[in-house]
Amino acid sequence: MTPAVKKTIPINITVDLEKDEVHVNPNPFYIDSVKQEEVQWVFAPPAGHPEIDCFTVYFPNASPFEETTFGHHRDHTGCARMNAVHNKLYDATLTVPGVGTCMIQGGVKP
């Protein structure tokens, strides 16, 4: 049997400087553990806003991934933890310094 190939699911992060808002799409997001999907954080700053190390995603209570914090443009999460609870939405905070914070959720499909 051929092992499954990892698939990357992009999570797009944008900011609205006029409203000091952070937007995430999709929210909530889901990855499929059978298909070995992983998230890639994609940050799209407005003109004049630095791209590198410009956001933090933090899963404070539990994470579906091995890591609980991400903060680099194009970071990959890796596949879901083996003991991640399927169909549970995990809460996270996404912060863009100087702009704002928003709550996001992510889950794992069986």
Image: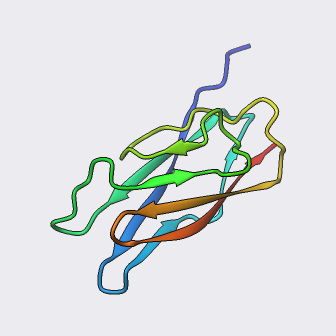
For the point 65% across and 32% down, the residue is: 66
For the point 40% across and 55% down, the residue is: 55
Q: Quadrant of residue 67?
A: top right
Residue 79: x and y in percent read: 63, 33
- Position of 12 compared to 28: left or right? left
Q: Nearer the viewer, residue 65 or 93?
A: 93
Q: Quadrant of residue 93?
A: bottom right
Q: Nearer the viewer, residue 66 or 37?
A: 66
For the point 84% across and 44% down, the residue is: 85
Q: Nearer the viewer, residue 52 or 38?
A: 52
The outermost residue toward the left is 48
- Position of 81 compared to 87: left or right? left
Q: Quadrant of the N terminus?
A: top right
Residue 106: x and y in percent read: 67, 55
Residue 80: x and y in percent read: 69, 36
- Position of 16 compared to 48: left or right? right
- The answer to whether residue 15 is above or below residue 59 is below
In this picture the colour scheme is: rainbow
Number of marks drawn = 0
Residue 108: x and y in percent read: 74, 47
The outermost residue toward the top is 1
- The answer to whether residue 25 is above or below residue 57 is below
Q: Quadrant of the C terminus?
A: top right
- Position of 23 compared to 72: left or right? right
The outermost residue toward the bottom is 19
